[in-house]
Image (cartoon, helix red, strand yellow):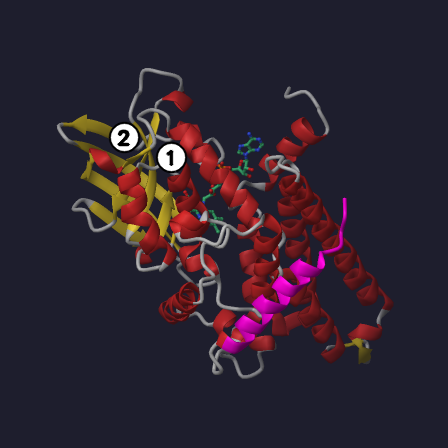
Amino acid sequence: MDLEFTAEEEDFRQEVRTWIEENLPKDYDPDEYFSTPDVDKKVEIALAWQKRLYEGGWTGLNWPKEYGGRGATVIEQHIFNEELGRARAPMAAINFIGVAMVGPTLIHWGTEEQKKRYLPKILSSEEIWCQGFSEPGAGSDLAALSTQAVEEGDHYVINGQKTWTSMAHYSHFMYLLARTNKDVKKHKGLSAFAVDMKSPGITVRPLVQLTGDSDFNEVFFEDVRVPKEQMIGPRDQGWDVAITTLMYERAGMGAGMEFEHALNQLVSLAKKTTRGGISASRDPWVRQQIAQFIIEWNAVKLTDLRALSKQISGEPPGWEGSICKLGSSYMNLRMTAFAMELLGPYGQLTRDCPLSVDQGAWLKQALMARAFTIGGGTSEIQRSILATRALGLPRK
Ligand SMILES: Cc1cc2nc3c(=O)[nH]c(=O)nc-3n(C[C@H](O)[C@H](O)[C@H](O)COP(=O)(O)OP(=O)(O)OC[C@H]3O[C@@H](n4cnc5c(N)ncnc54)[C@H](O)[C@@H]3O)c2cc1C
């Protein structure tokens, strides 16, 4: 494995960095953006940034050129993500599902009409997509889902409920997985659909998180009619379509640069906090804890590069992604808990309190940290993948 970037790749990094510096709005304040409870405002900023990226030709970087992408290599995509993270640019999350997951899935499985209809508006973020997979009775065991799609003339009629649907309240389309056949094994009777969120019979109910924000929703379907031509991939092969999508989701998640920023913030916090009459940054126990987080973070980053190196040699994303997901989410959980310990009672203060530290960001991050151990595959599922695929242990 070669950990050095080539001269061309370093040039590419410089090009991206310069473009971001020149194009991030001058009045953009990342601390304000990441701590504001005003989700509408956050979405507005993220959409404006997506538009700017699109106009600069930076969305769908790894999509084939014929579909409006740049046909970038996995390394270029990696460098691009790193630079966005380094600049703390507004999150691509507003249309992450569209650009990173639905687009590549449509390129693989969609009809020519579907590609023409949906891909350009995903790239331009004129249409935002959400992912309707999880249900109250189906999460880790996704194939157990029970939302039904029944064929009726030239439509399918959908009934059921989805949950934890990120950004459904801002979305124009849902990429839905529903059951089209109850008489076969559970994985064999699913189909995927593009569902217009304005269809009669859809109710979106935002869920309020521990942080007070509402990023995800419950979505109810009552006799929702979806034209047959909006099925993605062949009927009853929705499981294979979904696996394609999940591979892109895992590949797109990688090791996030936000942890790098959080580690720097933790060092600053230790410097400005007093423990036993001295700066916490001079307390050996504090120093050891921070050093431990830095070591773990570097281990995650190197594992991410190992995964990248495998992909470059043509291998599909492997179990290294599970190490990165497990390692970074677990480290984040302990790091934010440690920050709360350093802050003591100040840790409880939210952003609008006059005495809050770092705009109450640590409290929010500590509460959000649990979500990262669940979304995109829970820690237990990642451990099972590592046990069976990486270590070769028997399933039972
Ligand atoms: C921030 C966030 C965003 C999300 N966004 C979306 C979205 O946009 N669209 C969408 O469809 N879903 C979304 N989800 C849902 C997510 O995919 C599910 O929460 C996840 O798959 C887990 O499913 P579950 O919540 O039903 O938990 P369950 O699967 O019921 O798990 C409950 C507990 O049992 C454990 N468990 C389950 N099965 C096993 C097993 N086989 N072995 C060992 N332990 C097991 C789990 O690890 C967990 O601790 C999101 C979740 C989060 C946190």
Residue toward you, 297 or 369: 297
* Side of 18 relative to 151 (left or right): right
Occupied quadrant, residue 111: top left
Q: Is residue 6 magenta?
A: yes
Residue toward you, 242 or 277: 242
- Overall secondary structure of the magenta section: helix
Q: Is residue 199 above or below residue 51?
A: above
Circle 2/circle 1 CB separation < 8 Å: no
* Side of 130 relative to 386 (left or right): left
Q: Is residue 162 above or below residue 61?
A: above
Q: Which residue is mark 2?
A: 148
Q: Label 2: few (<14), some or many (≥20) within 10 Å?
A: many
Residue toward you, 344 or 220: 220
Q: Is residue 373 magenta?
A: no
Q: Earlier in the sequence, mark 2 or mark 1?
A: 1
Please name the amino acid that badge 2 sits on. Gln
Residue plotted at (52% across, 38% down): 247
Residue plotted at (40% across, 56% down): 95
Residue plotted at (64% across, 19% down): 396
Magenta residues, as a range?
A: 1-22
Which residue is outermost to the top?
183
Q: In x, y percent, where is residue 110?
A: 34, 37
Q: Quadrant of the N terminus?
A: top right
Q: In x, y percent, where is residue 18?
A: 58, 73
For the residues labelled 2 and 1, the Cα–Cα distance comes to 21 Å
* Label 1 element class: helix
Q: Which residue is mark 1?
A: 109
In this view of the protein, can residue 206 be seen by the observer?
A: no
* Label 2 element class: strand
